[in-house]
Amino acid sequence: MAINLLNEKLSWRSQQANRISRMQRAQETLGLALSGKILPALEIVPLLHSVLEPGDRVCLEGNNQKQADFLAESLRSVDPQRINGLHMIQSVIALPAHLDVFEKGIASKLDFSFSGPQANRLAKLVSSGKLNIGAIHTYLELFARYFVDLTPRVALVAAQYADRQGNLYTGPNTEDTPAILEATAFKGGIVIVQVNQIVDQLPRIDVPADWVDFVVEAPRPHYIEPLFTRDPAQISEIQILMAMMAIKGIYKEYEVNRLNHGIGFDTAAIELILPTYGEALGLRGKIARHWALNPHPTLIPAIEAGFVESVYSFGSELGMENYIRARPDIFFVGPDGSMRSNRALCQVAGHYACDMFIGSTLQIDLMGNSSTATLGRISGFGGAPNMGSDSRGRRHASAAWLKAGKQGRQASGQIPRGQKLVVQMVETFREHMHSAFVEKLDAWQLAEQASMPLPPVMIYGEDVTHILTEEGIANLLLCRNVEEREQAIRGVAGYTPVGMGRDRRVVENLRDRGIIQRPADLGIDKSLATRDLLAAKTMKDLVRLSGGLYDPPRQFRNW
């Protein structure tokens, strides 16, 4: 009995024992090349061979913006005969190296949130059987699993600076780093960090050295993508019309003050007409005051016009650093003047503290289910499902939340509660004349092809309260049954096959009842939907309105 108890106690420390073994191998391999926790860039692949084991769960920091690109490329260079079958967990698949490890057999399984530019290649790897998807998560959902059943054995992350003890400064694009490191460091994992520079003194300490095992100064600064920058010059008059309908038909109607915008030109148009159209409607101080949002450059005019009172961000945005530093009343900045954006906290803020999410999608079906995972393209969801779902745990009230809840529960006999506004804003036809409205989502076929237990739906129809197109707004809260809901969606689907299948009599009845609202029903003159309404028409205008503080990345400079 005594021996059995001793064995059980020994097994309780197996992860720590394994960690010690990996660290010893690293020490033996690197020898004098290792100075404290710091190693030369040339030694990174030998380090990976020492600390990785086949089948390891590896979290590679690939955020919406900040990328541990040097470590990703180094992982691609390990010997697949020695290191293989890795289970990669990472928020965003953004770089070719993220998928090269699957091509080479170094990794075999992936749990992720968003794939963006690698969406097409990801779909091909899934079809070829070289990549097995565990699940497509929301960011918050993936972070949660780090602490339950997807805890990393090895974390490969990026930071701005490290000092010689291994303390880290993650800077404005902290993003996913805290969630990854806390899960790894406190569960016997190995933490390897690439930094842009090793310095004697940090501006502030974002991660303490005792969470970090190895630090490497990368040959070049880590890659950051200006993902949230939209050039006002590319905003169309249709998008301006839709923005007018959003402001007058939803923001004003529900008194929306706490909100999140998805990425895109549709929402950029809203941001850019707040100081013009919103001001003309007398809405300054009445709508759009508090945001959970990356620092979109297109929000500069609304900030300068006094619409925006606060912005808490998931990540930063290239070129906005000086503007953010000069507007500490708006943004959350530290004593050093820079943000410490935290994606996990901002996702929580967007889910529980915002009254509305408005974003776009690639496909919507007849029940309002939407997905960005389509045949030949698995782009994932990012934060949209958390932003775009009713937070049923919420208990605090606001005017917008209460009104949406009252409309959604009318005549149901249910106990009163509020509801988050979830708005899908799409043009009826996407690029290459693909209809945004479909009878059945590609997600069903995709699930079958990839052996997924569920079709990858981004936002479930039961959470969607409004669909907004250039044809009008469908208020799904007011629909009394599924038949009305389907006709309301068909009623704003325009000349798509879904739209052409509408019952004209029923749709006119829905319009009479205010469930469908055309621009004319909202008192909007479509002839006024011109680019003259944009508070900034070019990137140069944004720079001017920022007082010269906004410094756009080179690819957005055309003057």
Image (cartoon, helix red, strand yellow):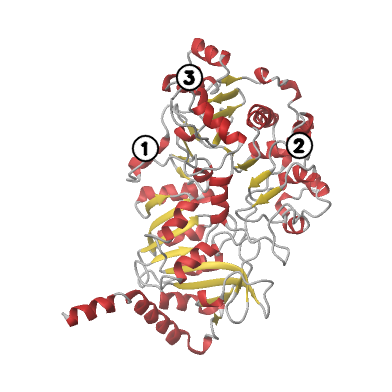
Q: Which amino acid type corresponds to the residue marked 2 in the rendered image?
A: Arg
Label 1 to label 3: alpha-carbon separation: 25 Å
- Disc 1 marks which residue? 445
Between 255 and 205, the one lying in front of the other is: 255
**Residue 212 seen:** no
Q: Which amino acid type corresponds to the residue marked 3 in the rendered image?
A: Gln
- Disc 2 marks which residue? 284
Q: Which residue lies furthest to the top in this view?
A: 505
Is residue 125 positioned above or below 496 on the image? below
Mark 1 neighbour class, 10 Å CA radius: few under 14, some 14 to 19, many 20 or more: some
- Disc 3 marks which residue? 487
Q: What element carries label 2?
A: loop
Q: Earlier in the sequence, mark 3 or mark 2?
A: 2
Direction from residue 370 to residue 10 in the image, left or right: left
Image position, residue 306 (x, y; %): 78, 43
Image position, residue 511 (x, y; %): 57, 15
